[in-house]
Amino acid sequence: MHIAVIGAGYVGIVSGACLADFGMKVTCVDKDQEKIEMLKRGIIPFYEPGLEELVKKNLKMERLSFTTNLKEAVKNSLVIFICVGTPPNPDGSADLSQIRDVALSLAEVIDEYKVIVTKSTVPVGTNRWIKSLIDSNKKADVAIDIISNPEFLREGAAIEDFMHPDRVIIGGESAYAIAIIKDIYRPLYLAETPFIITDLETAELIKYSSNAFLATKITFINEIANFCEKVGADVTVVAKGMGLDVRIGAKFLNPGPGFGGSCFPKDVKALVHHGRSVGSPFRILEAVLEANEKQKLRVLEKIETFLENVNEKTISILGLSFKPNTSDVRESPALVIIPILLKKGAKVKVYDPVAMEEFKKAIGDLEIEYCSTPLECVKDSNCLVILTEWNEFRFLDLSQIKKIMKTPILIDMRNIYDPSIPKKLGFSYSGIGRA
Ligand SMILES: NC(=O)c1ccc[n+]([C@@H]2O[C@H](COP(=O)([O-])OP(=O)(O)OC[C@H]3O[C@@H](n4cnc5c(N)ncnc54)[C@H](O)[C@@H]3O)[C@@H](O)[C@H]2O)c1
């Protein structure tokens, strides 16, 4: 089976490498020449555990290749996976321009039957639109089928998620095309992964509903955490007590500085926008978006509780990526908090194990001190803030840190420390949702 994957980003490279590892011949296409040159040498443009090894292995086995030549990749493939970005428009709706470009390019080059599979997260109705765009612009009189196959991988655990997903969703109308896609995923089927075969619209909505629900769960526990601080309860125990109820489940009940990343914010916004536009508003999700923006500011309230005024104070931030094990900083709370601190006159020092380059690109030319170790970051600081729960922040030498800070204040936005430990060492400590 020959497969083309269009868009060599997080989803495209992971899907391409994993499908190649299943034994298929995969060509990944991207319009970014520099990225493709790196990938040809086995260099991954972002941090994702295990991905470089998997790409190198499949390059060597000649099952995986990278190109900017879409025509060539499509010519040799029966199945074409679309994995390009669907970022938010200013009004919250999904920007489908990358999808449109790909559909029009495919219409130019397709000259025999192909199955087009959309892995990108796209609003309900988009797959039907892609098919009609291709059908009405195609140069050759050939049939195509379209399949919606949304992707659920999590950055930081992407290979494990692709190889052992909770479910595979396949939406389509052609039994023949569905059978081809089921065949591609046969290794997962044999491993008893549940498959849901459904129509295009339902498949598209499963993806949005899943992300919107998870974002709601995070926001719910964040608001419970804020309430805990007012009434003297401990959110970590509340979450544990809730999570043991099998109807609720323990995952996504960790409070923090607000959800970020490339998916939850944009997908919730897109669903809210779509709901409004068809007269079926998502009131819960509108509140989720509002509460999440407020949550990002909680850390500033905490800093100011201890320091009153941050002007000319040094604030050290550990963790810039939106979650651990990824260099992705898209919609990271750090992108909101740091510019506010700088505007208020603070000096900001930062450290992240892998996301500093991405962060520099995203935040632009602001006066931030990028440090090469956590200790360098906290030296002469008035307040240490842990924003991302990287493992290396779980066992910091707090006694040493206390000695080199100007004022020992620790704000732990991920509750990775037992409050009694920093307090015993003489820190002023604030976690989240622990009075
Ligand atoms: N990142 C995730 O964790 C994740 C998880 C599940 C689903 N998704 C969805 O998958 C899609 C892709 O996300 P991503 O994070 O991989 O995006 P990304 O921005 O990392 O990658 C997209 C790639 O597509 C390329 N591209 C754009 N237009 C192109 C064209 N016309 N021809 C060839 N290449 C083109 C870009 O150069 C880029 O390399 C999005 O819809 C996203 O919502 C992402």
Image (spheres, grey):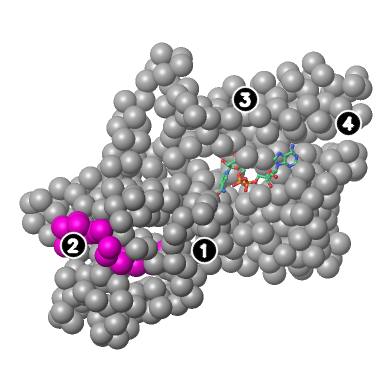
Q: What is the secondary structure assignment of the residue under circle 3?
A: helix
Percent position (x, y) of residue 66?
A: 81, 53
Q: Which dot marks residue 126?
A: 3
Instruction: Mark 1 vs mark 3: give the one in front.
Output: 1
Is residue 422 found inside the magenta-colored segment of the image? no
Q: Earlier in the sequence, mark 4 or mark 1?
A: 4
Disc 2 designates what residue?
Answer: 307
Q: Quadrant of the C terminus?
A: bottom left
Q: Is residue 403 visible?
A: yes
**Residue at 52% from the left image edge and 34% from the top image edge:** 88
Alpha-carbon neighbours of circle 3 within 10 Å: few (<14), some, or many (≥20)?
A: some
Q: Which amino acid does the dot numbered 3 rest on? A: Thr
Q: Earlier in the sequence, mark 2 or mark 4?
A: 4
Give the Cα separation between the discs numbered 3 and 4: 21 Å
Q: What is the secondary structure assignment of the residue under circle 1?
A: helix
**Residue at 74% from the left image edge and 20% from the top image edge:** 133
**Residue at 76% from the left image edge and 61% from the top image edge:** 38
Q: Is residue 389 visible?
A: no
Instruction: Mark 2 vs mark 4: give the one in front.
Output: 2
Q: What is the secondary structure assignment of the residue under circle 2?
A: helix
Percent position (x, y) of residue 166?
A: 52, 50
Q: Earlier in the sequence, mark 2 or mark 1?
A: 2
Q: Which amino acid does the dot numbered 4 rest on? A: Val
Circles 2 and 4: CB distance less than 8 Å? no
Circles 3 and 4: CB distance less than 8 Å? no
Number of marks in the rendered image: 4
What residue range appears in magenta? 303-319
**Residue at 25% from the left image edge and 81% from the top image edge:** 402
Q: Earlier in the sequence, mark 3 or mark 4?
A: 4
Q: Which dot marks residue 109?
A: 4
